[in-house]
């Protein structure tokens, strides 16, 4: 079951009098299964927000097809199953978050008890601001209110455009916790964030968009090119010869490396080292981080 | 396709909108004219000129030193009774005859009425429709001004007595008329005394003394004093002054409470009727007690409102619409009671009378041909 | 239908928090309160005997209350009509652009609503607001005159309804304008231009004589044929308020025409809205 199926999607914005303007997307193909956590990354102007708008029917493609949750994004019934947090959500300044959520619930055709709304607001960390007007909210609080609106009605697909923008580090942890819980519930997550660490931690599938093209797409592990090579640190003085005999090679500093195709080989090497009196204090699998992947993708595309 | 639907719908809706609005507004149709009747509230320029032309009597010498030099006088006004509390109403017969209302009324004069007018012309040498200029009605009698040079007074008063009076006056008296009653007895009834001054003013009186007084006033032999109608009050086609008693006598079915209010206020009415096109009536009510007069104004205003309400309730739309144009205009020490009779209304009112006359004429015509 | 009404309800709720709208209701209340305290009408046997404003006697004629108050009713009707339209244009100019504000329109379009419902709901919401304001003022006037002079007339209410129908046409153009150019100033300018053209269109038969016979006059007639007859409806409202005959062949036709014009303008707006990217 696919949550999202996009084929040859192209979008060119037209200016006044139908003059052709900027080409935002150029033939994007993408398939996401239900329950996937997809992170879309790319530099500014790559077409990420346009992609999201096309998915939601906010903008119309020039060519290509989009199927969301098995239907067209133009269909209100499909959109009823989507929770969306825009990049810059406009909130009514004079409304309280409760009143705002009540309004969104009505527009979504939901019948939600007030207690549920209060729970939801507490869930996103706005329990202390229930009676406050949103005009006085900080950027982080506004994002939380927007996130609550997106979560209303337990959607099947969550499309979040920079959800942690403006939220403090502790808040980001909270948001991550909320989204992890949603993923456990079975929701499909479509995340657009410039915080690569955020995306890396939450998403199992990644896509890199550059100049309207999806230049990288796949499982996070595949994209980050995880190697069968481990970096190990040992406590105190170690017998270098014994470690080399056990299959470890010296690395710059006090680190050692171990090539192991699987867990059994790795543990066997570690056992041999421990028998020689070495005590393991750190074990890290060697891989390329997302920044590196993005940099690679940009370079390759260029 | 769906998007094009909205554009097509817009074009259709605009076309329908234009059609409905063109029909609803009816640009080519006649707008309902607003009823705006000119009311005679002050003397107009033409009336000033008219007044000037009527000052044919030489001025009287001033009674006191230091007074402004007196103006020449209008014989008819000079002949009127003098002093407050009297009644006289002037009908500008000639102007009325040639006004739209006059024309309308003339169409209502049936065959018999026309023959009566012809008879008067033949017998007296006076055509009331042509020779009468003004008619004054007072409680004591009547005066007519106009052109009576062709009048055959001697023929009319063949069995009577004629005497010259003053410089230009003549008085005609007739013996009492003997009427035979059904029981065979006879009763004498006095006949009006007629005074003629300079073939331009005719005075009808109950007795010779009354007529003489009028002629004395014209020729300056009576004591000085303002006539009951002053020159500045001579505007409109009908104008005059009515005392409280005379007013209450001529207006029927006046509530006793209103009569009492009139009396308490010492009210006197100055009447002006403009009949040049629509008929506008202004009755300026003055009084001796300002507070009572103010109350009277309010009562009359209330009575008009009540009358209109009753007319509406009784479905009398014509009366209701007329009373809608009626109002009381308070002016400090007096108030104006204003009424308006649009010509269209009068035409409608008299339409039945005209039809009756037309029908009556044909009947009379056939009768006349059968009985010459 | 439900989503349409929900959007309208949201617009109303939002409007309730706007200073302009609050100022409108406060202004109407202030005028009514001032009149109720300062205007004294002495009625005797159904006739207006005296009128005092701030204790000073006004030189009014003593006539039946409904006749005497006609000028007041007419003036009130014109005030409700033209004043209401003018204020409505200013106060509601921002609703359309606000609906289309970045960050808001994306969120609204992501909700299970059709685009025409969004535009239609906004239109209905603003219309309901204008109707409430007009009826509030008119009801206040009716009650004021009823209590002060015993004159209970529905004339001002009908005038308010006519004003609301006219405003519907004006606002449809304003909202459509906002869809094309997201600007409160443009929206208000469009409303004002149509307002003036509508006054002209009401007197188009007379104004047409200013143009040379032939093509110029025909062009003028054709151009103004579709424009809502604002002044005709204002005159009709005043005539109704004063219980006077209407100078129209059919008020119903005119009203339907004006409403259809509004719907036509809204259809253009929906057409543009449907194809527009945000």
Image (cartoon, rainbow, N blue to C red):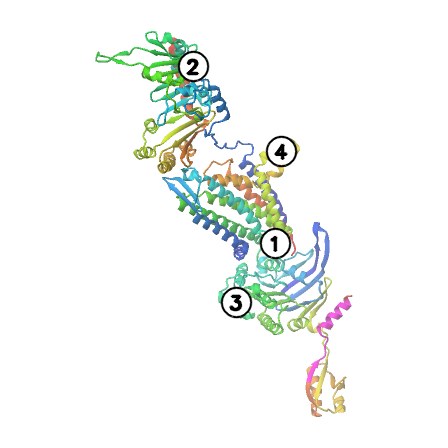
Up-down: is B49 above or below A183? above
Task: Report whether mark 3 lies on the same chain as mark 4.
Answer: no
Judged left or right of residue A256, residue B202 is: left
Task: Report whether mark 1 lies on the same chain as mark 4.
Answer: yes
Chain of the residue displaying label 4: C
Mark 1: secondary structure: helix
Q: Quadrant of the N terminus of chain A?
A: bottom right
Q: Residue at x 56, y 64 (%)?
A: A134
- Residue situated furthest front in the rendering: B65
Where residue A282 sits, quadrant-wise, is bottom right
Mark 4: secondary structure: loop
Q: Are marks 3 and 4 in contact (CB under 8 Å)?
A: no
| Closer mark to the observer between disc 2 and disc 3 | 2
Q: Which residues are magenta?
A: A282-300
| Closer mark to the observer between disc 3 and disc 4 | 4
Chain of the residue displaying label 1: C
| Closer mark to the observer between disc 4 and disc 2 | 2
Alpha carbon separation for disc pair 1 and 4: 38 Å
Is-magenta flag for residue B252? Answer: no
Is-magenta flag for residue A287? Answer: yes
Q: Which mark is residue C210?
A: 4
Mark 2: secondary structure: loop
User: Crowding near pointer 3: few (<14 within 10 Å), some, many (20+)?
Assistant: some
Q: Are marks 3 and 1 in contact (CB under 8 Å)?
A: no
Q: Which mark is residue B200?
A: 2
Which residue is identified by label 3?
A130
Task: Report whether mark 3 lies on the same chain as mark 1.
Answer: no
Task: Report whether mark 4 lies on the same chain as mark 2.
Answer: no
Mark 3: secondary structure: loop
Which residue is identified by label 1?
C97
> Which of B249 and A15 lies nearest the eye of the viewer?
B249
């Amino acid at each position: 079951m696919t949550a999202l199926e996009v084929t040859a999607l192209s979008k060119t914005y037209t200016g006044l009098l139908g003059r052709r303007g900027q080409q935002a997307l150029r033939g994007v193909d993408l398939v996401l299964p239900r329950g996937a956590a997809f992170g879309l990354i790319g530099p500014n102007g790559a077409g990420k927000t346009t992609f999201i708008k096309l998915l939601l029917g906010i903008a119309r493609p020039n060519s290509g097809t989009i199927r969301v949750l098995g239907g067209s994004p133009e269909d209100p019934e499909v959109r009823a199953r989507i929770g969306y947090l825009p990049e810059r959500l406009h909130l009514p300044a004079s409304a309280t978050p409760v009143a705002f959520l009540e309004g969104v619930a009505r527009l979504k055709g939901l019948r939600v008890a007030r207690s549920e709304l209060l729970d939801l607001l507490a869930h996103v960390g706005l329990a202390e601001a229930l009676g406050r007007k949103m005009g006085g909210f900080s950027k982080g609080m506004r994002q939380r209110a927007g996130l609550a609106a997106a979560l209303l009605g337990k959607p099947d697909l969550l499309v979040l455009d920079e959800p942690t923008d403006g939220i403090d580090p502790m808040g980001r942890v909270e948001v991550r916790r909320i989204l992890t819980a949603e993923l456990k519930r079975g929701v499909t997550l479509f995340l657009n964030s410039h915080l690569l660490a955020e995306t890396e931690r939450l998403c199992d599938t990644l896509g890199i968009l550059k100049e309207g093209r999806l230049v990288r797409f796949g499982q996070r592990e595949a994209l980050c090119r995880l190697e069968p090579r481990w970096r190990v640190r040992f406590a105190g003085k170690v017998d270098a010869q014994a470690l080399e005999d056990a299959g470890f090679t010296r690395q710059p500093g006090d680190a050692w490396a171990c090539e192991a195709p699987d867990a059994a080989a790795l543990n066997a090497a570690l056992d041999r080292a421990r028998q020689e009196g070495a005590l393991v204090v750190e074990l890290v699998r060697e891989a390329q981080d997302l920044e590196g992947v993005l940099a690679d993708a940009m370079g390759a595309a260029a | 396709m769906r998007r094009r639907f909205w554009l097509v719908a817009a074009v259709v809706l605009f076309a329908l909108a234009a059609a409905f609005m063109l029909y609803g507004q009816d640009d080519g149709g006649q707008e309902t004219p607003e009823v705006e009747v000119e009311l005679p509230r002050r003397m107009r320029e033409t009336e000033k000129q008219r007044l000037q032309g009527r000052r044919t009597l030489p001025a009287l010498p001033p009674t006191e030193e230091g007074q402004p030099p007196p103006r020449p006088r209008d014989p008819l006004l000079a002949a009127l009774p003098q002093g407050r509390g009297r009644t006289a109403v002037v009908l500008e017969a000639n102007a009325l005859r040639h006004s739209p209302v006059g024309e309308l009324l003339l169409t209502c004069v049936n065959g018999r009425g026309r023959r009566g007018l012809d008879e008067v012309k033949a017998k007296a040498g006076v055509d009331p429709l042509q020779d009468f200029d003004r008619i004054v009605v007072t409680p004591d009698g009547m005066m007519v001004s106009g052109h009576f040079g062709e009048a055959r007074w001697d023929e009319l008063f063949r069995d009577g007595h004629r005497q010259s009076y003053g410089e230009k006056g003549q008085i005609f008296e007739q013996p009492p008329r003997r009427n035979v009653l059904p029981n065979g007895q006879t009763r004498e009834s006095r006949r009006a005394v007629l005074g003629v001054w300079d073939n331009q003013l005719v005075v009808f009186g109950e007795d010779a003394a009354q007529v003489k007084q009028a002629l004395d006033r014209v020729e300056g032999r009576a004591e000085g004093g303002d006539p009951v109608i002053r020159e500045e009050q001579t505007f409109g086609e009908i104008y005059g002054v009515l005392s409280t008693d005379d007013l209450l006598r001529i207006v029927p079915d006046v509530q006793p409470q209103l009569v009492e209010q009139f009396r308490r206020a010492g009210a006197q009415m100055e009447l002006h009727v403009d009949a040049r096109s629509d008929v506008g009536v202004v009755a300026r009510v003055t009084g001796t007690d300002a507070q009572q007069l103010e109350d009277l104004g309010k009562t009359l205003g209330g009575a008009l409102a009540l009358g209109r309400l009753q007319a509406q309730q009784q479905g009398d739309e014509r009366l209701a619409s007329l009373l809608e144009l009626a109002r009381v205009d308070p002016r400090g020490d007096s108030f104006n009671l204003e009424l308006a009779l649009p010509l269209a209304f009068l035409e409608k009112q008299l339409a039945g009378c005209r039809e009756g006359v037309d029908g009556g004429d044909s009947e009379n015509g056939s009768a006349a041909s059968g009985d010459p | 239908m439900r989503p349409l009404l929900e959007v309208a309800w949201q617009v109303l709720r939002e409007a309730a928090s706007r200073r302009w709208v609050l100022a409108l209701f406060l202004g109407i209340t202030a005028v009514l309160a001032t009149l109720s305290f300062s205007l004294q009408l002495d009625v005797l046997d159904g006739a207006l005997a005296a009128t005092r404003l701030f204790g000073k006697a006004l030189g009014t004629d003593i006539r039946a209350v409904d006749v005497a108050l006609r000028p007041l009713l007419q003036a009130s009707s014109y005030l409700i009509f033209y004043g209401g339209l003018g204020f409505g244009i200013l106060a509601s100019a921002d609703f359309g652009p606000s609906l289309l504000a970045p960050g808001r329109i994306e969120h609204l379009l992501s909700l299970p609503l059709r685009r025409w419902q969004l535009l239609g709901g906004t239109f209905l919401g603003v219309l309901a607001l204008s109707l409430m304001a007009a009826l509030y003022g008119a009801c206040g006037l009716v009650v004021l005159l009823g209590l002060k002079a015993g004159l209970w007339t529905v004339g001002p209410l009908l005038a308010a309804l006519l004003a609301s129908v006219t405003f519907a046409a004006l606002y449809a153009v304003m909202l459509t304008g906002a869809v094309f150019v997201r600007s409160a100033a443009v929206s208000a300018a469009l409303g004002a231009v149509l307002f003036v053209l509508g006054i002209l269109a009401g007197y188009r038969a007379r104004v047409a004589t200013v143009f040379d016979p032939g093509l110029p006059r025909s062009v003028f007639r054709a151009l103004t044929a579709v424009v809502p007859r604002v002044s005709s409806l204002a005159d009709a409202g005043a005539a109704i308020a004063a219980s006077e005959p209407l100078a129209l062949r059919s008020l119903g036709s005119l009203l339907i025409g004006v409403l259809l014009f509004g719907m036509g303008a809204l259809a253009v707006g929906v057409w543009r809205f449907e194809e527009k990217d945000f």
